[in-house]
Image: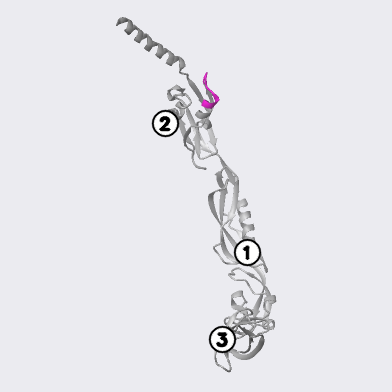
Amino acid sequence: MRVCGSLVVSLVVFLVVCGVASAQTIKITFVDVVEVDGPSIFMGDISHKIEGKQLTKNQIDVVQSLRLKYSPLVGRPPVTIDADFIGNSLKIAKRALRKVGLEPSSFDISKSTKVLVSRKSQSVDAQELISFAQSALLEELTQRFNGGEYQIEADTSVPNLSLPTGKLDFSLRRLRSQFLAGDINVYLDISIDGVNRKSVKIPFSVKLTSKVLIAKKNFTRGDPLDLKDFEGSTQTLGQARLAPVHETQLKQMRANRRVSKGTVLISNMVERIPKILSGKLVTIVANFNGVRVKSSGTALADGFIGQEISVKNRLSKRVIFGVVMPNGDVQVAVQ
């Protein structure tokens, strides 16, 4: 029994000695202050050197990849990472460490360790935002109406921005305002590496200088519009929701509402004169077995070329439907 006891004691001593011999101390030297790019802080971000006699590259990579916490937002104060926090983080990561043969207790972390971590940022000048928005706004307004000159002034109170690092892209949101001139707010979406990070509102004041037509007499709904009844002028409009009508657009147009003398003619006041007017006598054309037959009737509605309208036949008094042709006839399909 004494011999067996001696063997057991010797074996325990041997295992303890072997365990001590196999354990290695890993020393990490930390930086004092650091800036990180991403939203997370990793051990590799705050460590200057990781040392150990038998450390492999794979083990070092695992230690460096340990995620500690979220990094502060851009513009916020730095966060402090101390020895206690690092020690707790190593214990939390013990499963990942043990997979590569390391133990949390193997790390030598100085009690005085304290690292200040802040977020890297890039500055976006307000003028850069304004220039992009102004150009995009001008393009949008020109697509709506290109018959004038726009004067666009931005609100200079737009601040400079501090944003996370990465590739910047700007995009113009769809304009909420349908005005051509006046106070127009432009909204820019700012993305970094393809991810939308911030939206900025930029107020603009827009004026439109354009040729306009001013009515020299009163018009009622349906009155044809003739250029001689208008005075041409060039005006700068501080408010304009709809486009002014130019003289080249006045051909074959009529008033679709009452227009008072002295009014600037705009697009919602006019409409094209139909090929056929309601109440007018029209020619009805139909084909019967290759024979072209004509009759007459009264149009019951205005009709443009290619549009289907109803017509009342003068003889039969029947209401029929046909398509307005370029020559003003109404073509009826015979079934």
Upstream in the sequence, badge 2 or badge 3?
2
Percent across and percent down for residue 174 are: 56, 60
Which element is circle 2 on?
A: helix
Of 266 and 65, nearer the camera is 65
Q: How crowded is mark 1: few (under 14 residues within 10 Å), some or many (20 or more)?
A: some
Name the residue at the front extreme: 289
Is residue 66 positioned above or below 177 on the image? above
Q: What stretch is highlighted in magenta?
A: 52-59
Q: What is the C-alpha distance between the residues marked 2 and 1?
A: 58 Å
Magenta residues, dominant SS class = loop
161 or 5: nearer the eye?
5
Q: Type of residue at label 1?
A: Leu
- Say which residue appears at 69% left-offset and 81% top-offset: 227
Pointer 2 with pointer 3, Cβ within 8 A: no
- Looking at the image, residue 306 lies above or below residue 23: below
Q: Residue 318: which numbered mark, if any?
A: none
Mark toward the start of the polypeptide (2 vs 1): 2
Q: What element carries label 3?
A: strand
Task: Report helix, strand or loop for mark 1.
Answer: helix
Dot 2 alpha-carbon crowd within 10 angstroms: few under 14, some 14 to 19, many 20 or more = some
Residue of label 3: 320
Residue at the image point whose x is 57% and y is 55% from the top: 188
Q: Name the residue under label 2.
A: 92
The reply to whether callout 1 and callout 3 are in contact (CB within 8 Å) is no
* Residue denoted by label 1: 141
Q: In which quarter of the image is residue 144?
A: bottom right
- In the rendered image, the quadrant that contains the N terminus is top left
Residue type beneath disc 2: Ile
